[in-house]
Amino acid sequence: MSDSDTQRPDPLSIIPTDAPPAQLFVVLHGESANPAQVLQLVAALRQAFPSSAIIQPYGPFGAAEKRRWIVNSTPTAHQYVELIAQAGAALAQEITRWQQQHGVNGEQTAVVGFSEGAAVALEAVSTVPRLAGRALLFSTRFASLPEGIPHTVTLHLLHGGADTIAPASQAHQVHARLAELEGDVTLDIASNVGHELHAALIHQAVVRLQTCIPLRSWEDAQGAPDLRIDEYSANAPEDVGEPPPKTLH
């Protein structure tokens, strides 16, 4: 840690008190931020999945409330790939401890990240088989295109179409790469949304969790569906009259 790094605060946790958790959500903030950045997302998850445990860790590095997931705040492209890999490995170890602590397995676990947190989440679930059954990846600049992906995890990419910090074209590239690898992946682009956890993206994330049947379940039941590569242009909540249709993709 650098001289400017301060002690890492304990994670924020929401744990059911009336019964063991049915699921575990691990929600990661972006760079130079803290769990307050993802409170709207956490509130939506809590409302939709009230029996779940939700853990919001602080990034390991940084000062005060501006936490990061990697030690170097201005890495080169090569350094960024290495640092994200290290952060993903460290996160996987933490998730395993939380799973043991709360009595849930990987299929019951979802890893959720925004921006830099999403890059770390993708690294963790890509390299550790059965770490999680779902990953929700919001508005991130991915460190590199995945070399492989466990077929035990469903990935949901959610991005703003007007994002200038992490252009949506990167999400399209990752989506295409994961499709080539026969990964289970969805892509949602919210038009006129920038680099933010916009309500339209949060809404669509919950829809995906509630209605999307994992590809592995389809394969076990009746073989893979013909089409699995989808793109959905989400509308701003004020423009939505009815909930979006349920989808199996």
Image: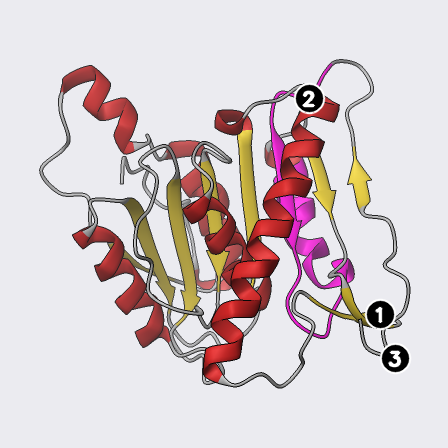
Q: How many marks?
A: 3
In space, the residues marked 1 and 2 are separated at their CA atoms by 29 Å
* Residue 37 magenta-highlighted: yes
Q: Tell me the element at label 1.
A: loop
**How far across and how far down the image is residue 57, in percent?**
74, 51
Judged by depth in the image, the label closer to the viewer, 2 or 3, is: 3
Report which residue position mark 1 lands on: 65
The crowd level at tag 3 (other Cα within 10 Å; few <14, some 14-19, many 20+) is few
Report which residue position mark 2 lands on: 21
Q: If the image is split into quadrants, where does the C terminus sit?
A: top left
Q: Decide if residue 179 is on the left or right side of residue 101.
A: left
Report which residue position mark 3 lands on: 3
248, 180: nearer the viewer: 180
**How far across and how far down the image is residue 79, in percent?**
53, 78
Q: Tell me the element at label 2.
A: loop
- The kind of residue on which mark 2 rests is Pro
Which of the two labelled residues, at mark 1 and mark 2, occupies the earlier sequence position? 2
Q: Is residue 240 above or below residue 30?
A: above
In space, the residues marked 1 and 3 are separated at their CA atoms by 16 Å
Taking the spot 47% from the left edge, 40% from the top edge, the residue there is 128
Which of the two labelled residues, at mark 1 and mark 3, occupies the earlier sequence position? 3
Q: Decide if residue 211 is on the left or right side of residue 52.
A: left
- The kind of residue on which mark 1 rests is Glu
Q: If the image is split into quadrants, where does the N terminus sit?
A: bottom right
